[in-house]
Each structure stands twice: as C-alpha cells, then as structure tokens.
Image (cartoon, grey):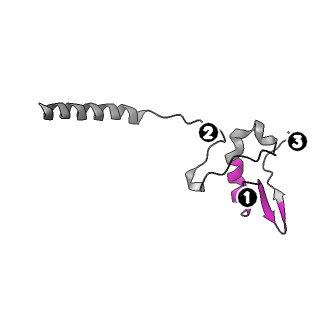
C-alpha cells in the first residue's frame, strides 16, 4: 500500500511539475534588465543624479553601454576616467531633468 501511495504521489508531482515548467514567470526589474553574462549587477544610480529618478528602468542599459564604451567606467560614480580626470558618462538625451 505504501509503495502504491508513493508511486501515486510521485506521478502527481511529475504531472504538476510539467505544468509549472511551461509557465513563464514575469520579473519586474526596477533598474531595467541586467544580463548575468555582463558581470555582477551594478549598484543603484547615484542619488545626486536627478535624471535617474524618472528613468530608473533605463539604468542597467546605461551602465552596460558605458562599460562597453569606456573601459574605465565606474557605475558607483556614473563616470569614466579619462586622462587625469573623471568624466560623466552621457549616453542619454535629457534636458537637465
């Protein structure tokens, strides 16, 4: 009896698991999409940069673009090092938000 019960439970789990595996999960990402192949996710945007308050969903894309374009980019500052100074990474069009 116990073997029959265990077999029934195993079959029910497999049948239930198949339905769950086919369902897609929806992930809401506050800062946009970060692909794990790009490395560790960066920190949130600096609070001093007002632009990102209204464009949070674009942050990860911006960071990835700056990382690829400027190899000495630092997402904590949202700047890259050029010569002997830090320069803001500007890949977005905004009018002083």
Q: Position of residue 56 (x, y in %)?
A: 71, 39
Instruction: Describe the element under mark 2 as helix, strand or loop.
Output: loop
The magenta stretch spans residue 10: no
Residue at (73% x, 59% y) in the render: 73
* The image quarter in which residue 81 lies: bottom right
Which badge, 2 or 3, is on the more N-terminal residue? 2
**Residue at 69%, 46% in the rendered image:** 44
Left or right of 16 on screen, residue 77? right
Residue hosting label 3:
96
Which residue matches tag 1? Answer: 74
What x and y, as percent, mark residue 21? 39, 36
Q: Earlier in the sequence, mark 1 or mark 3?
A: 1
Total residue callouts? 3
Image quadrant where one finds the C terminus: top right
The boundaries of the magenta stretch are 61-86
Q: Position of residue 5 (x, y in %)?
A: 17, 30
From this viewpoint, is residue 44 visible? Answer: yes
| Magenta span includes 79 | yes
Q: Residues within 10 Å of mark 3 (few under 14, many from 20)?
A: few
Is label 1 in contact with label 3 (beta carbons under 8 Å)? Answer: no
Residue ID for mark 2: 29
Query: Farthest residue toward the left?
Result: 1
- Mark 2 Cα shell of 10 Å, populated few (<14), some (14-19), many (≥20): few
Q: Residues within 10 Å of mark 1 (few under 14, many from 20)?
A: some
Q: CA distance from mark 1 to mark 2?
A: 21 Å
């Amino acid at each position: 009896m116990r073997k029959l019960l265990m077999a029934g439970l195993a079959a029910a789990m497999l049948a239930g698991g198949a339905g769950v595996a086919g369902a897609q999960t929806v992930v809401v990402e506050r800062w946009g999409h970060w692909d794990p192949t790009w490395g560790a996710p960066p920190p949130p945007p600096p609070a001093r940069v007002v632009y990102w308050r209204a464009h949070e969903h674009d942050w990860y894309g911006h960071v990835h673009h700056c990382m690829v374009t400027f190899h000495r980019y630092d997402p904590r500052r949202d700047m890259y090092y050029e010569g002997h100074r830090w320069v803001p990474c500007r890949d977005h069009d905004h009018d002083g938000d």
